[in-house]
Image: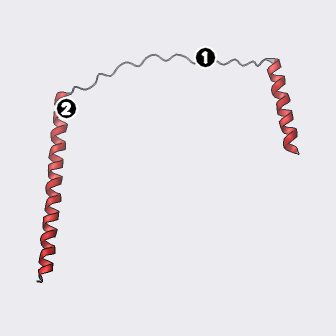
Amino acid sequence: MSEILVQSLELLVLGMGFVFVFLMVLVWATSTMSSLVMKHLPEPVPQAAAPRRAAPQPKNQIDPTTMAVITAALKQHRSRQKK
């Protein structure tokens, strides 16, 4: 085999080995931290939800003056849109 091919295989093995070791350390660290957190921090106690207040009911009646103003504004808007 040529020298370059041997060097590339060494680099391949070294790189894959480094990634494998790094991932193993990462899994170990995550497992350790998870077990420590579960051991030292208690689960939160769920609190009862506050009773919901009913939303205020809107008034169904509109003041006649307000209704007249709205009607006049709509008529004016529609007459301008037709032009």
Residue 29 occupies quadrant: top left
Q: Which quadrant would the N terminus be assigned to in this image?
A: bottom left
* Residue where numbered disc 2 is placed: 38
Q: Which quadrant would the C terminus be assigned to in this image?
A: top right
* Residue where numbered disc 1 is placed: 56
Residue at the image point whose x is 14% and y is 59% from the top: 18
What is the distance, in whole Å, between disc 1 and disc 2 at their CAs? 45 Å
What amino acid is at disc 1? Pro
Looking at the picture, how far across and down is residue 78, in whole percent?
84, 38
**62 shown above or below 31:** above
Residue at the image point whose x is 28% and y is 24% from the top: 44
Helix, strand or loop at mark 2: helix
Residue 57 occupies quadrant: top right
Looking at the picture, how far across and down is residue 65, in whole percent?
82, 19
**36 shown above or below 59:** below
Asked whether 9 or 43 is in front, the reply is: 9
**45 shown above or below 36:** above
Count of numbered labels shown in the rendering: 2
Residue at the image point whose x is 83% and y is 25% from the top: 69
Residue at the image point whose x is 16% and y is 36% from the top: 35
Asked whether 61 or 70 is in front, the reply is: 70
Pointer 1 and pointer 2: residues touching (CB < 8 Å)? no
Asked whether 51 or 68 is in front, the reply is: 68
Looking at the picture, how far across and down is residue 22, in whole percent?
16, 54
